[in-house]
Image (tube, helix red, strand yellow):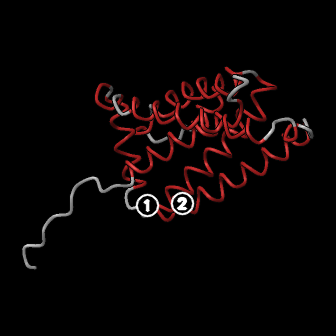
């Protein structure tokens, strides 16, 4: 019998997985377009990040309606809460940062220019498939989010930094909510 993964195991696995994904994406982007990182002035990158953070925050707040109206989204939220409950604020910040940067570098920075927005978004959705039936809504939600992030990345004012900022905001807000205890601690009648 296997022990269910707790927040520390999920955190460590994510560091390895997303760290590797980010390195692979950076190498691929560099090999395909070595000058890509020298084209945008820092103020444009910061503006893109800011636009993404605002749009991602709004999207995250609106997405909290989904579990109220869709049973599969409720199951997804419940299962993810089981995985992330008890994560520390630093773990939440690092997970949100490393997953948003690495996934956007791979799917929007490397794959989308070659495969197009629909295929890159479909692969993004597929990457969120786990085989756990309780997480069955995740690939569809991720694919739709991938389309939105892909459009944001194509917008010259926001670009890839905007997609990273939006993805970070969605992950950080969501993980903060999911890391809270599912139920309040019960009072100890003996103490």
Tell me: 172 left or right of 41.
Answer: left
Along the horizontal axis of the image, is 2 left or right of 125? left
Contact between marks 2 and 1 (CB within 8 A): the answer is yes
Q: Which quadrant of the figure contains the C terminus?
A: bottom left
Position of 106 with respect to 76 (left or right) is right
Circle number at residue 76: none
Residue that sits furthest to the bottom in the current view: 191
Judging depth in this view, the residue of 89 and 118 nearest the camera is 89
Residue labelled with disc 2: 11
* Residue 181, picture quadrant: bottom left
The residue positioned 67% from the left and 20% from the top of the image is 118
90 is higher (above) or lower (below) than 96: below
Quarter of the image for residue 39 reads top right
Query: Which residue in the structure is indicated by mark 1?
Result: 87
Percent across and percent down for residue 9 are 51, 63
Say few, some or many: other residues with alpha carbon within 10 Å of mark 1 (under 14 / 14 to 19 / 20 or more).
many
The residue that appears at 49% across and 47% down in the rendered structure is 172
- Could you tell me residue 73's position as x and y percent? 37, 32
C-alpha gap between disc 2 and disc 1: 8 Å
- Left or right: where does residue 34 sit relative to residue 149? right
Q: How many numbered discs sit on the rendered protein?
A: 2
How packed mark 2 is, by other alpha carbons closer than 10 Å (few <14, some 14-19, many 20 or more), is: some
């Amino acid at each position: 019998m296997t022990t269910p993964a707790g927040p520390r195991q999920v955190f460590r696995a994510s560091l390895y997985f997303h760290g590797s994904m980010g390195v692979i994406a950076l190498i691929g982007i560099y090999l395909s377009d070595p000058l890509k990182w020298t084209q945008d002035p820092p103020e444009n990158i910061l503006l893109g990040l800011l636009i993404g953070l605002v749009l991602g925050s709004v999207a995250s707040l609106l997405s909290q309606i989904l579990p109220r109206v869709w049973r599969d989204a409720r199951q997804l939220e419940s299962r993810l809460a089981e995985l992330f409950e008890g994560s520390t604020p630093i773990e939440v910040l690092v997970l949100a940062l490393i997953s948003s940067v690495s996934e956007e570098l791979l799917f929007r920075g490397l794959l989308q220019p070659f495969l197009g927005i629909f295929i890159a978004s479909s692969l993004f959705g597929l990457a969120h498939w786990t085989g756990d039936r309780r997480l069955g809504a995740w690939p569809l939600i991720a694919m739709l989010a991938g389309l939105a992030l892909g459009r944001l990345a194509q917008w010259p004012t926001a670009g890839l930094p905007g997609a990273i900022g939006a993805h970070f905001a969605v992950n950080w807000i969501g993980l903060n909510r999911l890391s809270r205890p599912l139920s309040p601690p019960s009072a100890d009648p003996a103490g």
